[in-house]
Image (cartoon, rainbow, N blue to C red):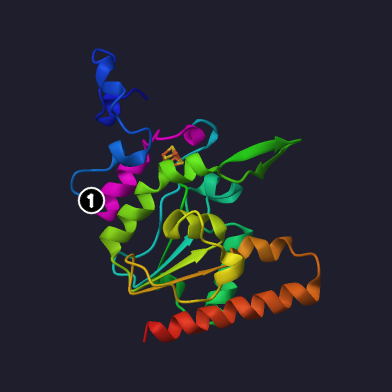
Amino acid sequence: MNAAAHGGVTGAEPWLNHRLPKDARRFLPPRPTLTALRKAAASCTGCDLYKNATQTVFGAGPATARLMLVGEQPGDAEDREGLPFVGPAGRLLDRALVAACIDRSLVYVTNAVKHFKWVQRGKRRLHAKPGAREIEACRPWPEAEIAVLAPAVIVCLGATAAQALLGRDFRVTQRRGELIPSTLAPHVMATIHPSSLLREPDKARREAEFARFVAELHRIAALLL
Ligand code: SF4
């Protein structure tokens, strides 16, 4: 899709092209609502990740949600279905939310990066971690979702989401489960991404990590009362 179709400039004004931000900002709608943001993000070409992905996977959940969960990026299943957290990590997240007595239908779930980055291995498309440039390019979308939703609590799931929203120096390994002072929302926490539990080969450690994750979500549930 060309720049003009996105409301950008055409090749007739090459001097202007140098002044456009090379990120998602130029695709933000003038009057953002969740519907307008989702529609605009569907045409985003703010970085190269759209080229190999099936579609933009925008956030999902009610506009009235008080809890916003932010993951890294869509996976294979999410890329095909166009919805966040519908694959194996999403099912694990669902289990954890049930265990923490949080109704997922009241939660807004999204990702820091809206297109699936992957590498081919045989017939499979394997997750590839988004780079700093891609995270930075995509950040206007989660920022706009936060601005529209104004959630009471934001939970960053994994290092990519935490570094996108809390700064590149933020380390989940050091500050997991802490309430982080932030202007993003009254309460902000960072913890693991549920996909890390799927990668843990040791059963006892996996179960202990899951229990810790649920305990963190219990603390979040208490903040929502
Ligand atoms: S990953 Fe984000 S910035 Fe890059 S094309 Fe997709 S929506 Fe746009």
Q: State whether residue 61 is above or below residue 209.
A: above
Residue 82 placement, left or right of 67: right
Say whether residue 35 is magenta: yes
In the rendering, at what x and y percent does residue 205 appear?
A: 76, 74
Residue 175 placement, left or right of 121: left
Of residues 83 and 30, which is closer to you in this image? 30
In the rendering, at what x and y percent does residue 68 appear?
A: 40, 67
Residue found 51% across the figure and 48% down from its top: 81
Residue found 37% across the figure and 40% down from its top: 42
Under 8 Å from ligand 1: the CB of mark 1? no
State the residue position of label 1: 32
Say whether residue 78 is magenta: no
Residue 52 placement, left or right of 38: right
> Where's ligand 1: which quadrant?
top left
Mark 1: amino acid:
Pro
Residue found 26% across the figure and 48% down from its top: 36
In the rendering, at what x and y percent does residue 169 appear?
A: 51, 57
Residue 91 visible within the image: no
Figure label count: 1
Residue 197 visible within the image: yes
Q: Secondary structure at mark 1?
A: loop
Q: State whether residue 62 is above or below residue 12.
A: below
Residue lying at the far front of the rendered structure: 169
Q: Quadrant of the image for the C terminus?
A: bottom left
Q: Which residues are magenta?
A: 32-50
In the rendering, at what x and y percent does residue 102 appear?
A: 47, 79
Residue lying at the far top of the rendered structure: 12
Residue 7, picture quadrant: top left
Within-10-Å neighbours for mark 1: few <14, some 14–19, many 20+: some
Residue 213, picture quadrant: bottom right
